[in-house]
Amino acid sequence: MCALKMPFDGNSLPALSLKISKGQYNPLQPCFSKELRLLVVAMLSVDINKRPSINEILKMPIIKYRIKSYLTEMDYSKEFSHTILHKYVKINTSTNININ
């Protein structure tokens, strides 16, 4: 989304699938901040254990700053005074179940 294009490309579905499974993509250009480039690398990691959770992402300074710029201090405190995904129970590293 940052570069306005898909991170993975391929001439065929098998080629695309291979690039995704190997994590082969063009990194973001240096014009983007180091923090954003590192976030993208982490989010596109092939190893699921190296990918940040939504709670970890929302605690990152680069994300917190952007969120704060759109919310009042009161709204920010209200929204972030509890677990972000408070409607979900974590079952394992890859599955969440809605308890509502």
Image: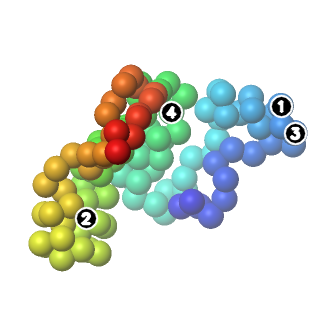
Q: Position of residue 58 (x, y in %)?
A: 29, 51
The residue lying at 24 percent from left, 55 percent from top is 61
Instruction: Check residue 45 in the rendering and tell me which mark sits there, or answer none.
Output: 4
- Label 4, secondary structure: give it: loop
Point 66% across, 28% down: residue: 21
Q: Name the residue under label 3.
A: 12
The x, y position of residue 28, in whole percent, is: 54, 53
Q: Name the residue under label 2.
A: 65
* Depicted 36 relative to depicted 100: above or below: below
Q: Which image quarter is the C terminus in?
A: top left
Asked if the residue at tag 1 contacts the one at tag 3, i.e. Cβ–Cβ closer than 8 Å, the answer is yes
Label 4 – label 2 distance at C-alpha: 24 Å
**Amino acid type of the residue tagged 4 in the rendering:** Ser
SS under mark 1? helix
Quadrant housing residue 29: bottom right
Q: N-terminal of the two: label 1 or label 2?
A: 1
Name the residue located 53 percent from the left edge and 61 percent from the top edge: 2
Q: How many angstroms separate mark 3 from mark 2 (CA)?
A: 40 Å
Which residue occupies 38% across, 23% down?
92
In space, the residues marked 3 and 4 are separated at their CA atoms by 22 Å
Asked whether the residues under the numbered discs 3 and 2 touch, taking CB atoms below 8 Å apart as contact, a structural biologist would say no
Q: How far apart are marks 4 and 1 (CA)?
A: 20 Å
On the picture, is 16 further left or further right than 62? right
38, 8: nearer the viewer: 8
Q: In which quarter of the image is residue 69?
A: bottom left
Mark 2 is on which residue type? Answer: Tyr
Q: Which comes before the other along the chain, label 3 or label 4?
A: 3
Binning the other alpha carbons within 10 Å of mark 1 as few (below 14), some (14 to 19) or many (20 upward) gives: few
Name the disc covering residue 14, or none: 1
Amino acid, disc 1: Pro
